[in-house]
Image: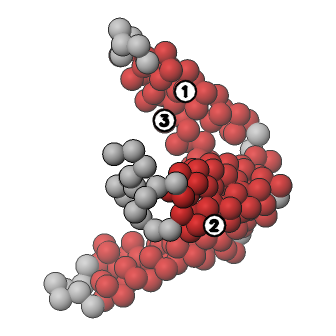
């Protein structure tokens, strides 16, 4: 049983290490230059809105069930949103940062409520602490707009890439010692 490949981890160990190193390098770049990384995230989001909106319009126009004005309108709105994000990138960063602050606030309130409802159980305090941190982070972001908009998305991208890179390298090194 020991030294067997865990289910779900296929592929060669070197591939995991290579992906992890690339992710760590991308995360390091994002942390060292969060403004550029924030604009990069914005451009990806804008491109996805345009792509998905275009696909929705195309599928709606080709639907064998007839034209759905709602679906067509939603596709056009997605395209317009993507174009607007690209046309006014600073405004787009502020908008995405506001959405992120709202999500932090919502997550924090939910975690605090869940923690207080689970008070007799051991991890309840961690839920309340985590929720409080999320609420404080949302308040911090809101109090520091628009300056926070220029760097927050890039910093979050950097942290995410670094954490993914660490687990990918760790998984690859673990797989190196596993018999196939």
Rendered image: mark on residue 130: 1
Give the SS element for disc 2: helix
* Above or below for 118 versus 147: above
- What residue is shown with label 2? 18
Quadrant housing residue 161: bottom right
Do the numbered discs 3 and 1 sit on residues whose CB atoms are within 8 Å? no
Q: Nearer the viewer, mark 1 or mark 2?
A: 2
Q: Earlier in the sequence, mark 3 or mark 1?
A: 3
Q: Position of residue 50 (x, y in %)?
A: 52, 78
Give the SS element for disc 3: helix
Q: How many marks?
A: 3
Question: In whole angstroms, how far apart are the C-alphas of marks 1 and 2?
Answer: 33 Å
Relative to residue 125, is residue 100 drawn left or right?
Answer: right
Q: Position of residue 167 (x, y in %)?
A: 57, 50
Do the numbered discs 1 and 2 sit on residues whose CB atoms are within 8 Å? no
Residue pushed farthest left?
65
Q: Nearer the viewer, mark 3 or mark 1?
A: 1
Q: Position of residue 125 (x, y in %)?
A: 49, 15
Question: In whole angstroms, how far apart are the C-alphas of marks 3 and 2?
Answer: 34 Å
> Which of the pair 159/14 is nearer the observer?
14
Question: Who's the residue at 77% across and 56% down the image?
Answer: 28
Q: Nearer the viewer, mark 3 or mark 2?
A: 2
- What residue is shown with label 3? 107
């Amino acid at each position: 049983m020991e030294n067997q490949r865990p289910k779900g981890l296929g592929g060669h160990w070197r591939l995991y290490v290579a992906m992890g190193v690339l992710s760590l390098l991308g995360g390091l770049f994002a942390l060292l230059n969060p403004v550029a990384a924030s604009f990069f995230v914005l451009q990806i989001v804008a491109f996805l809105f345009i792509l998905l909106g275009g696909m929705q319009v195309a599928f709606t126009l080709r639907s064998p069930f007839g034209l759905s004005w709602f679906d067509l309108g939603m596709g056009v709105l997605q395209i317009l949103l993507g174009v607007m994000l690209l046309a006014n990138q600073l405004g787009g960063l502020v908008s995405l940062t506001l959405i992120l602050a709202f999500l932090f606030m919502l997550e924090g309130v939910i975690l605090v409520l869940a923690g207080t409802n689970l008070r007799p159980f051991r991890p309840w305090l961690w839920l309340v602490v985590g929720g409080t941190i999320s609420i404080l982070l949302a308040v911090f972001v809101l109090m520091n707009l628009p300056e926070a908009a220029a760097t927050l998305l890039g910093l979050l991208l950097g942290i995410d890439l670094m954490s993914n890179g660490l687990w990918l390298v760790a998984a690859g090194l673990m797989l190196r010692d596993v018999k196939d």
